[in-house]
Amino acid sequence: AKVIYMAKKFVGEPKPSDFQLKEEPLPDLKDGEILVEAEWMSVDPYMRAYMDRYPAGTKMIGGQVGKVLQSKHKDYKVGDYVMGYLGWSSRSVVHVDSTKGDMTKGDVEKVRHPDMPLSYALGALGMPGATAYFGLLELCQPKEGETVVVNGAAGAVGMLVGQIAKVKGCKVIGFAGSDAKVEWLKKTLGFDHAYNYKTCNIANALKESAPNGVDCYFDNVGGEFSSIVLTKMNLFGRIAVCGAIASYNADMANPPMAPVIQGPMVFKQLKMEGFVVSRWRQRFPEAYDQMYQWIKEGKLKVQEHLYEGFENMPHALIGMLRGENTGKAVVKVTGS
Ligand code: NDP
């Protein structure tokens, strides 16, 4: 199997030289185990943030969709497709029952909708889909006619948040990092307004697009951007704090401080809640099934940004963190 390690601790942006690829033998299969060969690998922002907790030499964490090549488990047969948190390995031996329900221990589950492209199990029909679904619907509780703001809007989670908000009858305002992404959000995904946060004045953009204020804010980015949005929130507005990608490459020994947010929090009586999607782990099938239905009905469009080759995983992670991707960044494993 090919396995990729974080050879050096990341300082700022990860660099190609921080990673190391090794060839490793696999153990023989024991009872209760399956051998999985990766076909699609995911690169996600949490990898940058979570790897800070581990020492150099740790195997890279992450999800993948793979095919069962051998099985000594009664519920899995050769040819089944699974989604698993198996890290950056091209092949893995997994003891299924010891990992059940624990994403940190290499949890695997069968791909629930194998009639869709398999890579969707890493995006709209997987963890990012559940993040958009539960984060928006449970924490923001958007109502018809309300105004929803989402940043990181052209990414895996953001593109789904905006489209779900449209399904719920909201006005959707998205922010993303290039003019091409902004055009795509408006023309293809039907966002009501979209802006390039790198070139626009965020306060003016919100004044123009949300003259009656913002009811729901789905925050993927954090930092100063969020402080500005907070000043535009309506009374009893709801904020789902999903991510903080603006600071994932920061030096966490000296973290950047956002400008004061307590003023609007108090006087607008806002509700701001952070979440990790695994909170709704037991309900993931509900999200997958609803997203599947919306995709079938044409209410949800799915876009992927493809990288090719297992050895290109570092390049894909670095590229995604820099904003190369429109839609979900995935790596097609070839010739592993
Ligand atoms: P994306 O597909 O959105 O990819 C990351 C995007 O972030 C890039 O494409 C880039 O787009 C944008 N970005 C990078 N740097 C910055 C910056 N400094 N300021 C603003 N935008 C930036 O990734 P995901 O959809 O997978 O993740 C989006 C967010 O959701 C992340 O913060 C992630 O950690 C979080 N998340 C949280 C989960 C949870 O359980 N709470 C679960 C899953 C994701 P652009 O061109 O627009 O800059």
Image (cartoon, grey):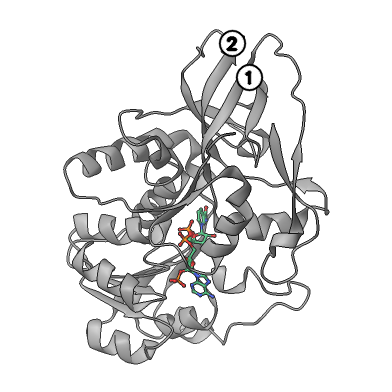
Task: Please state the horizontal and vertical placement of residue 270, each as a whole percent of the image.
Answer: 42, 73
Say whether residue 33 is visible: yes
Image point (65%, 12%), residue name? 32
Closer to us: 217 or 162: 162
The extreme front residue here reads 335
User: Where does residue 320 sit, x and y in percent of width and height?
Assistant: 52, 62
Q: Position of residue 6 (x, y in %)?
A: 75, 52
Between 52 and 232, the residue placed more toward the observer is 52
Residue 234 in view: no
Residue under numbered circle 1: 97
Q: Quick one: quadrant of the N terminus?
A: top right
Residue marked by disc 2:
73
Task: Say which residue appears at 61% left-offset and 73% top-offset.
Answer: 247
Q: Look at 27% across and 67% down and name the residue there.
A: 185
**Could you tell me if the residues under marks 2 and 1 are in contact, i.e. CB atoms within 8 Å?**
yes
Task: Give the amino acid type for the residue marked by disc 2 in the picture.
Answer: His
In the figure, is residue 12 to the left or right of 146? right
The residues bearing labels 2 and 1 have C-alpha atoms spaced at a distance of 9 Å
Label 2 sits on a secondary structure element that is: loop
Q: How far across and how far down the image is residue 220, in percent?
A: 47, 66
In the depicted structure, whether residue 79 falls above or below residue 331: above
Image vertical order of residue 310 relative to residue 230, above or below: above
How many residues crowd around disc 1 within 10 Å: few (fewer than 14), some, or many (20 or more)?
Answer: few
Which residue lies at the image location 35% right of the left edge and 72% below the top edge? Answer: 236
User: In which quadrant of the rendered view does residue 93 lie?
Assistant: top right
In this rendering, the label closer to the viewer, 2 or 1: 2
Mark 1: amino acid: Asp
Ligand 1 within 8 Å of disc 1? The answer is no
Residue nearer the viewer, 2 or 122: 2
Image quarter (top left, top right, bottom left or bottom right) of the C terminus: top right
Number of the label disc, if any, that sits on residue 329: none
Going from the N terminus, do you reach mark 2 or mark 1 first?
Answer: 2
